[in-house]
Structure formats: C-alpha cells, structure tokens
Image (tube, helix red, strand yellow):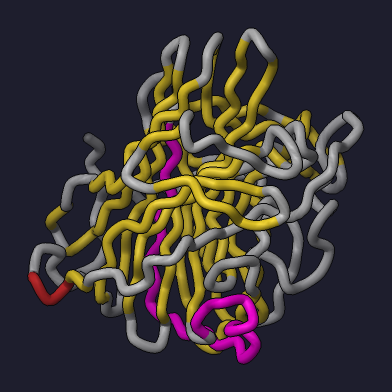
C-alpha cells in the first residue's frame, strides 16, 4: 500500500451522502482512434492522428525526449502506473453530445496505458483505461474501466477469455471490448484523487486491477480497487505496462501513457467553459519507488474523446490544465514533481 500525501481538504469519503448509485447501465466505451500499421522508423511520430484541436488534452508520454528538435526515444516497463489529479474548477458543455449518446455536460479524465504481453505466439497489446466520467452540471463522477485489444484492427476480445466484475460488449464494426462501471461519487472543489492501474502475470494469464484513491485533508484513504480483470492467454513469457518511443503497437497506435481530458464517451468531443486542474503521471520503478514519467506532451493520441478550449502549461514544474488556447506540443523533458 502506498502512502500518498494529501494536499487539500475534501468531503469525507465514507459519508453516505458522498456515494451516489450509478444510473447508466448500458455499455460505456472510450474507443481508440482508428489506427493503421505503421512502418518502423527511428522513433514514433506523436502527430499521426492529432495535429490540431480538438485533441485529448492534458499530459501524455510517448517515450520521447525532444531537445530543440533532437528526439531520443526511451522505454519504461512497469507493473503499475498512477495518475494524480487535483481539480479546482470544472464545467463542460457540447451541444452535439447527444448525437454520440452522452450528456452534453459530460466530460472524462482518462488515464490510459498499454499492457504489452509477450508470448510464444507473438506480441499482444491491451489498452487499459481507468476513467473518471464527470457529469459536470451536477458534480458527480463515476469510475469506469475499459480494455481494448490493440493487437489488431478491429479490436476483439473473447468473453470466454476475460473475467472480471464487468463484461465484454460490442462497440460496432466488429470491435469488442471489456468494460465495468465502478462507484459514483458526488464531489466538491477542490477534488483530488489518484488513478491506479496495477498488473501481474503468469504463464497462462494476465491480471489487471483498476482503482482510485481519494485524497482528503491529513487523512489518506486506502486505494480502492473496483475491478480485477483476468485475461487468459497461453504461453506468456512476460507482460508489463510499457511506454516505448521506438515502436508502435501492432495496430499502429502508441505504447504511451496518457492522463487527458476529453468528451463524455463514444468518441465525443466536448468544450470546457471552466477548468483548472493539476496533473501528474507516475510509474513504479524496479526499486519499488513511485517515479515521475519524465517527458510529457500536452495531448494524447490513442483515445478518440477530445477537448476544445484546454490549455496545458507548466507552473513551477507542475502540469496545469485550464481554459484557453490548445497547443499540441512538448510540455517538458524533465517532470520531477512528486504530488502523491
């Protein structure tokens, strides 16, 4: 169990009024962009799928350092990734959202990572999404997870090979994915919490835990894992969450780590009218310490949900997202702030 430093006073997690039962029972999906196999080069190109707003906005690592145009790829392999968020203002509205089947006031903050599974049959890539789904007009957030298979296009998962609290569902066009709807909370500002995705493997399966930790005052609540998912797969040699700037996933997307704002789901964009949030991305190092992911861009590229009117900047070494002109660019090569 990790000890996280609480930075702000929040409503008490265990008060009955803080919990609100989820009301939406239909499949909730946060799909990947439509990737295609990419030739291998010196390093990946972050701008294949998003070159201008709207894009998923916040922080993301593609496994690339970029010093004045000199790009150097790097690799992180880990069993656990954590995403920190401290939100002090939030309101989104997108008039056309109902065309996507979501509330016009909905928005998501998604922590998305890729689990690389190396087997005797080849390499597989699973996209793990730990998502805060916000209804910004009534100050409620629901934690939801998705798993997509980035090994091929369309993305397919067999229900007979996946077990967890959720289920496998169709996303259309031959795509299937796993999802689970976790708890819903009423929140007040400032609202601070941590996403946690933890993994392990055996020779015949990989297991993924999706969780969160609410931070409040001087007290720290334990990490709450709301879903444990096992994917059965024979001949596993190794499996790790991977950030890799050298290669693409088999279907042409990225081995990246993202903590990004976007629309409410189903590929929807949204526009933020109020937003102020501090963000951080971390991984568990080989020595067991929580370590900042060093280089960060201002946008993600794997998820289809995108955002208008989000500006990302670095304030005293800490990533901050607020309303303003969006720029798709490198944010920092040297993120070192420990916020958790």
Query: Seen in the image, is 24 located left or right of residue 124?
Result: left
The correct choice, above or below, for 203 with respect to 215 in the image is above
Is residue 316 in sight in this rendering?
Answer: no
Q: Position of residue 123 (x, y in %)?
A: 67, 20
Query: Seen in the image, is 108 located left or right of residue 141?
Result: right
Magenta stretch holds residue 102 = yes
Q: Position of residue 253 (x, y in %)?
A: 74, 43
Near-viewer residue (32 or 334):
32
Q: Position of residue 242 (x, y in %)?
A: 59, 30
Residue under the image location 53 percent in, 72 percent down: 264
The correct choice, above or below, for 324 with respect to 161 in the image is below
Residue 3 sits in which quadrant? top left
Near-viewer residue (13 or 207):
207
Query: Seen in the image, is 105 located left or right of residue 270?
Result: left
Figure quadrant of the N terminus: top left
Is residue 131 in sight in this rendering?
Answer: yes
Which residues lie in the magenta part? 80-103
Query: Seen in the image, is 5 located left or right of residue 96?
Result: left
Residue under the image location 50 percent in, 68 percent down: 108
Near-viewer residue (17 or 317):
17
Magenta stretch holds residue 48 = no
Residue under the image location 12 percent in, 56 percent down: 219
The correct choice, above or below, for 10 with respect to 252 in the image is below
């Amino acid at each position: 169990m990790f000890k996280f430093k609480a930075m702000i006073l929040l409503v008490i997690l265990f008060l009955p009024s803080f919990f609100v039962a989820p009301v939406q029972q239909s499949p909730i999906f946060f799909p990947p962009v439509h990737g295609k196999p990419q030739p291998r080069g010196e390093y990946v190109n972050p701008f294949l799928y998003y070159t201008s707003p709207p894009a998923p906005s916040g922080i993301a690592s593609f496994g690339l350092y970029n010093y004045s145009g000199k790009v150097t790829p790097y690799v992180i392999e880990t069993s656990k990734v954590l995403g920190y968020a401290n939100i002090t203002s939030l309101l989104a509205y997108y008039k056309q959202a109902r065309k996507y089947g979501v509330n016009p006031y909905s928005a998501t903050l998604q922590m998305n990572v890729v689990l690389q599974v190396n087997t005797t049959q080849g390499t597989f890539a699973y996209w793990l999404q730990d998502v805060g789904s916000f209804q910004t007009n009534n100050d409620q957030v629901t934690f939801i997870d998705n798993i997509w298979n980035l090994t091929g296009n369309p993305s397919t998962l067999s229900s007979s090979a996946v077990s967890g609290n959720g289920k496998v569902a169709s996303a259309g066009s031959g795509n299937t994915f796993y999802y689970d709807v976790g708890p819903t909370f009423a929140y007040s500002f400032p609202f601070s919490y941590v996403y946690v995705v933890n993994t392990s493997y055996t020779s015949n399966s990989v297991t993924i835990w999706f969780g969160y930790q609410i931070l409040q005052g001087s007290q720290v609540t334990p990490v709450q894992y709301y879903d444990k998912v096992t994917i059965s797969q024979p001949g596993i040699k190794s499996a790790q969450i991977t950030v890799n700037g050298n290669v693409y996933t088999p279907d042409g997307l990225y081995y990246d780590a993202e903590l990004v704002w976007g629309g409410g789901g189903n590929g929807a964009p949204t526009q933020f009218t109020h937003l102020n949030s501090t963000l951080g991305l971390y991984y568990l190092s080989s020595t067991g310490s929580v370590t900042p992911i060093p280089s960060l861009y201002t946008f993600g590229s794997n998820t289809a949900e995108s955002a208008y009117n989000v500006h990302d900047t670095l304030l005293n070494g800490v990533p901050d997202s607020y309303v303003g002109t969006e720029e798709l660019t490198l944010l920092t090569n040297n993120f070192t702030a420990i916020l958790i």
